[in-house]
Image (tube, rainbow, N blue to C red):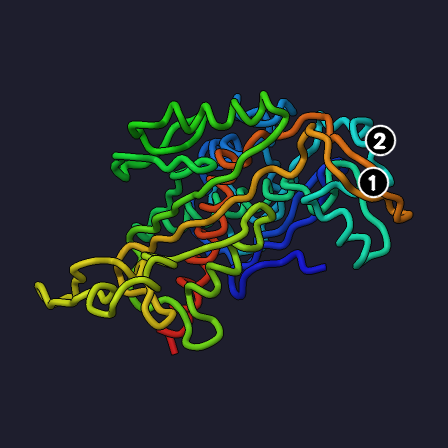
Amino acid sequence: MSSSFGKMLTLTTFGESHGAALGGVVDGFPSGIAIDEDFIRSEMARRRPGSTPLGTQRSEDDVPRILSGVFNGISTGTPIGFIIENKTQRSQDYSSIEHVYRPGHADYTYCAKYGLRDYRGGGRASGRETSCRVFGGALAKLFLREEGIAVNAAVIQVHGIKAEGYEWKPPFSPPLYAPPCRNLEAMIKAVEDARNDLDSVGGIIECHITGVPSGLGEPVFDKLDAVLAHAILSIGAVKGIEFGRGFESARLRGSENNDEMRAENGRIVFASNNAGGILGGISSGSDIVFRSAIKPTPSIAKTQLTVTDEMVNTEIAVHGRHDSTILPRAVPVIEAMAALTIADFLIQKRCYDKR
């Protein structure tokens, strides 16, 4: 099982939803970076269970404990080890599904691969593992901040309701972490309606990365957008990603989709950003913009058809503390993986520039 991400800046994680703790190691992090633990805790708080009334009723502090790699509030350049304790897990909530596969979950596929599964909240396949990603992403954001780079994401669609009439002015506020828009209440109501119907909804999260210099990314297999797609699609709830105009570009002519260029004050500027800030897999200097499709939370109390691990047809209704939508808590996870990716490429470029 692969539990590491990155080339020069790597995040390796461990832990399960109902184990004693989760944690990991961030290796390759530059020395001399001020480690703002209040900022790290604020990032963790955005993702933690119980952080929004639209999500799970499970509540965890999710205060990470840094074990190494930081001295007097400054990164030393050595591996940064950390741990996040699980304190309020209720494994008994899952006893009824010990031998039953949940639709939409990785229960069956984990059994197909490993011959067994941790049925308590999904084990390693649980969204709880993303807490480690947010810790690593918070460190990456602290590094990127010193480089003038910012990563911000927001919910722009819930179920079939798209945010209307909004401006992109981060940061965005709970409970949905959507930009202020004409139909924000309708978007929130869609989540509440699903919850009242014992169901769940998904949506779309948009992410903007500003201040990225041109020249990040590698030709062919390690294109910047390819690695970003890898990072974002590794998040369990994500089912699709597009950059810039994305799938809409398939309906355009080249004259409509190309971003025209001009030279101003000794630098290249683009008249538009249909490419989403990446050309040929390399950053252009424009804002990097992508959108991620987030599936509905699969654990729902509505009765569904399924099978047992002995291949017996049955029904299931998943009770317990689950999100009616994963969207607001997925926002900081999207940002974290994007930040880790950009930070890794920035460190790679520094190495190449020194050759």
Nearest to the observer: residue 154 or residue 41 = 154
Secondary element at tag 1: loop
On the rendered image, what quadrant is the C terminus found in? bottom left
Q: Are marks 1 and 2 in contact (CB under 8 Å)?
A: yes
Q: Which mark is residue 96?
A: 2
* Residue furthest left as drawn: 265
The residue shown at (38%, 47%) is 207
Q: Which mark is residue 100?
A: 1
Q: Is residue 277 left or right of residue 17?
A: left
**What residue type is disc 1 on?**
Val
Residue 350 percent across, percent down from the top left: 38, 67
Q: How many marks?
A: 2
Residue 65 shows up from this direction: yes
Residue 212 percent across, percent down from the top left: 31, 57
- The residues bearing labels 1 and 2 have C-alpha atoms spaced at a distance of 8 Å
**What residue type is disc 2 on?**
Ser
Give the image quarter of residue 244. bottom left
The residue shown at (50%, 54%) is 240
Residue 345 percent across, percent down from the top left: 43, 64
Nearest to the observer: residue 340 or residue 67 = 340
